[in-house]
């Protein structure tokens, strides 16, 4: 018999778990809200509170023939607990984990919205987006330092790297982000008018060179416990008098190069900017690219703020910090390029481009792929960082903004 939850079986499940029923009281309403690729998600309300239940499916929700390990739930629970320890205000609280049925109980953030949706419905610049971009930089800085060998020391870091190993989901990223968009693959589907744009990217030897280096770093460089899938659809935002920015869905988390998480964010800023370009909103497109700088500055500030407590300052001095941050910046630029390409060409496309009318969709995809190329090859061509304007410096020209 299937152990998968549905709206009808959730009340009995809650009643069978004392820690959940004591939080909720009597269940009064259950709503299925999952719209991602992999999981069942329910908002559960009760007489004394509410929470979210997230259960992993044994296959990809949008492609049931694609099996998927359910152990990813244990990994998500571990990453979330680790991130909660160092950046509690930037993640949902983990309330409970059921390792037999792969169910996470999480803080209910129903008063938040998915940032991608918010970005895609705006028509003009908003300071709120800078608030979110800065909070995410602070989150990556806190997690990047707090889970690294510099933050926890050598032995603890090695134990954590072993504990957080996530081979199946890493392989998905290695394939979907760092391979398939740049080769011929069944997952690659674009509008016929964008086929030459894809061909230009895939036939560029510098692009393949850069992707190869980035893929090896992703597979081997265990710097910090990454979120692993930090796109704007993995971020809940609540703006206004009490802003709250929370990063969710950390099942792709593992120890990898810190620039990967920043690069995922930057890539999604470029995708949002490509949408704005296609809609004729060049001021907004520039503002979206400018979020890259906001995130970087907050990241660097959070990282430097913790630097005084680092492991082994005899060797890890201030000149090392400067070189390391340059490395993180260069990695982020490259991973941003890969993220843009995969979201336009491969599996798991994004609404930023897909929800546009056909003519604009072609334009958005075209300028995004041009930006992807320039981001991917930037470091190969001697581009150094961090620079003050960062993403805008690199991506504005291919987006037609300079
Ligand atoms: C099969 S999983 C496809 C994608 O969904 C997730 O959000 C990740 O981005 C992954 O690459
Ligand atoms: Mg997700």
Image (tube, grey):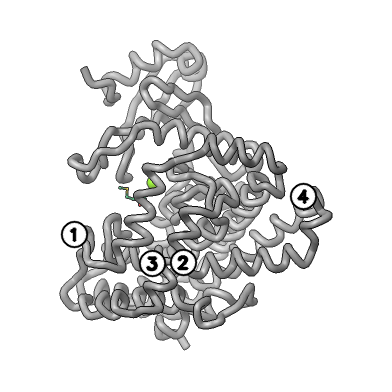
In this view of the protein, which residue sits in the foreground, 22 or 241? 22
Q: Kindly indicate whether the residue at mark 1 contacts the one at mark 3 (C-beta within 8 angstroms).
A: no
- How far across and down, in percent of the image, does residue 297 sit? 65, 65
Q: Is mark 2 within 8 Å of ligand 1?
A: no
In this view of the protein, which residue sits in the foreground, 187 or 3? 187
Return the disc, 1 or 2, that comes first in the chain's sequence. 1
- Determine the residue positioned at 22% across, 76% down: 194
As drawn, 150 above or below 395: above
Q: Secondary structure at mark 2?
A: helix
Query: For residue 340, which numbered disc appears in the image?
Result: 3
Left or right relative to 161: residue 12: left
Return the disc, 4 or 2, that comes first in the chain's sequence. 2
Q: Is mark 4 within 8 Å of ligand 1?
A: no
Q: Secondary structure at mark 1?
A: loop
- How far across and down, in percent of the image, does residue 306 sit? 75, 51
- Determine the residue positioned at 66% across, 65% down: 325
Camera sees residue 294: no
Q: Measure the alpha-carbon separation of dots 4 and 2.
A: 28 Å
Q: Secondary structure at mark 4?
A: loop
Q: Measure the alpha-carbon separation of dots 3 and 4.
A: 34 Å
Return the disc, 1 or 4, that comes first in the chain's sequence. 1
> Which label sits in the foreground, 4 or 2?
2
**Residue annotated with mark 4:** 310
**Residue annotated with mark 1:** 186
**Residue annotated with mark 2:** 213
Left or right relative to 339: residue 147: right
- Determine the residue positioned at 51% across, 46% down: 247
């Amino acid at each position: 018999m299937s152990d998968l939850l549905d709206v009808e079986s959730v009340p009995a499940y809650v009643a069978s778990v004392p820690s959940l029923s004591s939080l909720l009281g009597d269940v009064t309403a259950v709503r299925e809200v999952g719209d991602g690729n992999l999981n069942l998600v329910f908002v559960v309300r009760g007489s004394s509170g509410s929470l979210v239940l997230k259960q992993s499916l044994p296959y990809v929700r949008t492609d049931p023939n694609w099996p998927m390990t359910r152990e990813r739930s244990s990994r998500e629970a571990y990453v979330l607990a680790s991130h909660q320890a160092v950046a509690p205000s930037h993640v949902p609280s983990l309330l409970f984990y059921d390792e037999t049925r792969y169910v996470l109980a999480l803080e209910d953030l129903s008063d938040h919205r998915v940032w991608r949706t918010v970005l895609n419905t705006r028509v003009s610049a908003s300071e709120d987006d800078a608030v979110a971009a800065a909070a995410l930089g602070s989150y990556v800085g806190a997690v990047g330092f707090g889970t690294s060998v510099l933050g926890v020391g050598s032995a603890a870091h090695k134990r954590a790297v072993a504990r957080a190993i996530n081979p199946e989901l890493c392989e998905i990223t290695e394939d979907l982000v760092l391979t398939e968009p740049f080769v011929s693959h069944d997952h690659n589907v674009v509008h016929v008018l964008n086929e030459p744009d894809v061909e230009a990217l895939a036939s560029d030897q510098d692009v393949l060179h850069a992707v190869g280096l980035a893929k090896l770093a992703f597979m081997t460089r265990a710097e910090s416990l990454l979120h692993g899938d930090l796109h704007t659809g993995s971020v809940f935002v609540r703006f206004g008098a009490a802003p709250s920015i929370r990063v969710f869905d950390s099942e792709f988390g593992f120890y990898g190069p810190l620039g990967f998480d920043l690069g995922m964010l930057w890539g999604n800023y470029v995708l949002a900017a490509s949408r704005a370009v296609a809609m004729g909103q060049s001021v907004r497109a520039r503002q979206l690219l400018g979020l890259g700088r906001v995130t970087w500055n907050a990241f660097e500030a959070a990282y430097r703020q913790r630097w005084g407590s680092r492991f082994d300052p005899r060797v890890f001095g201030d000149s090392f910090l400067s070189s390391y941050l340059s490395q993180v910046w260069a990695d982020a630029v490259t991973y941003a390029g890969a993220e843009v390409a995969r979201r336009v060409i491969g599996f798991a496309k994004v609404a930023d481009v897909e929800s546009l009318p056909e003519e604009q969709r072609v334009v958005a995809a075209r300028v995004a792929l041009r930006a992807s190329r320039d981001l991917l090859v930037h470091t190969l061509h001697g581009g150094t960082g961090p620079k003050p304007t960062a993403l805008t410096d690199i991506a504005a020209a291919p987006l037609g903004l300079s």
